[in-house]
Amino acid sequence: MDKFIIKGGKKLNGTVRISGSKNAALPILVAGLLIEKGQTVIKNVPDLADIDTILKVLNNLGVKTIRNKKEGTVTIDATDIKSYEAPYDLVRKMRASFLVMGPLLARFNEARVSLPGGCVLGPRPVDYHIKAFIKMGAKINEYKGYIKATSRGLQGTVIHFDQPSHTGTENLLMAACLAKGKTTIINAACDPEVIDVARFLNRAGAKINGAGTNVVTIEGVKRLHSVEYSVMADRLEAGTFMIAVGATGGKVLIKPACEDYLGIVIDKLRQTGIKIKSQKDALFVSCENNLNPVDITTFPYPGFPTDLQASFMAMCCTNKGLSRIKETVFTERFSHVMELTRLGADIRVAGQEAVVRGVKRLKGTSVMASDIRAGAGLVVAALAASGRSEILRVYHIDRGYEHIDEKLRRLGADIKREEV
């Protein structure tokens, strides 16, 4: 188990290259299950612990994978599936593993998947997935923590989500590709990563329309074919580095920009006084002065991303005045507040809202990451703090950020990884 040692107070300067999107790569790799023959090559796959986990899940099912970490490629051959079960030992590590249910059910009319684990962010039930599969004609049974689904062939239908579900939309997209007839998803998630999954599936022969809107239609086809596809850049990593520049000061060129998917984030950062300029497929981010307070409310895309809430709060800890942060997506996504207060932050939480009163300076100490994004927020705070900070349980951060310590060192940060 590793930890980060950070000596804060240094400005970030230089260029950082953004990796492929974790939240797009995971479902795209899983979607490879739908392709009966041939080798599918996925490019721009980030080197992350969550990618390791999903590949183990696929290998357990009998999928042959070849990974080239240096080139960022994964080759998938799902011709000879040997199992329809995703065991608890693997699925417990990451919620996205539940995404194998849709492709397995669509292609083989059978799936047995453990109820998922992952970050503890409050209730994130898979009810949406299960209800949708039932409406498509599947029979569902729960036994000893496993969901078993069987079908005589999924049927297209109209699915209404009570609220947008990122993984629910992706699971249903994959299942509906091979279903008979037309499937319509009402109140679908509009996230860019969902668009990327749909784009991959369409490249492989699917017929999906409306991805990126709240009404998506899928015309079932008999089979998909192998393709080569490059995963989109990670807008959340780009946003995290932009916020880190605000917290520390400095001048950083972020490429690729991900600008089209970060509209509200860029707007909020500019409100604080951070300067952001477009340069071809890059963003130049600079910060020289003390920042102004700002209010944010997390909301499904295109609202402010809940996955950037912790980093944004960390930046606000030294902004002038009062900043208000309201979390509407996950009920337990303020786990980082206690750790930030250990660094000297002045934060008061009441229900879904946190009020951050800016302090002159954070002071280094030992803190612990509780999930991927909380860990990133602690890194941002430690970079801005005076003195030495120690961040424990960085395996959480490694699940979502590719070599973040190496990238920060190249920008001038004093950060190193040590084994505990």
Image (spheres, rainbow, N blue to C red):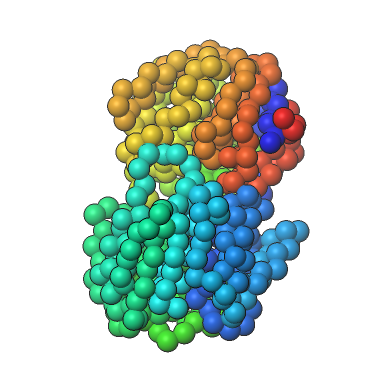
Q: Evaluate whether residue 201 shows in this view.
A: yes
Q: Quadrant of residue 365?
A: top right
In the rendered view, tell whether residue 2 sits above or below residue 195.
Answer: above
Residue 26 position, x and y percent, is 54, 59
Horizontal side of 61 relative to 175 (left or right) equals right
Residue 375 position, x and y percent, is 56, 34
Q: Residue at x 69, y 61 (%)?
A: 72
Residue 164 position, x and y percent, is 31, 54
Farthest bottom residue in view: 222
Q: Quadrant of residue 267?
A: top left
Residue 352 position, x and y percent, is 31, 30
Q: Evaluate whether residue 211 shows in this view.
A: no
Q: Residue at x 46, y 72 (%)?
A: 104
Q: Nearer the viewer, residue 245 or 356?
A: 356
Quarter holding the N terminus?
Answer: top right
Q: Residue at x 65, y 72 (%)?
A: 64
Quarter holding the C terminus?
Answer: top right
In the rendered view, tell whether residue 74 sits above or below residue 276.
Answer: below
Q: Nearer the viewer, residue 152 or 99?
A: 152
In the rendered view, tell whether residue 237 sits above or below residue 337.
Answer: below
Q: Nearer the viewer, residue 239 or 107?
A: 107
Q: Residue at x 28, y 74 (%)?
A: 137
Horizontal side of 135 relative to 144 (left or right) equals left
**Circle count:** 0
In the rendered view, tell whether residue 105 sits above or below residue 195.
Answer: below
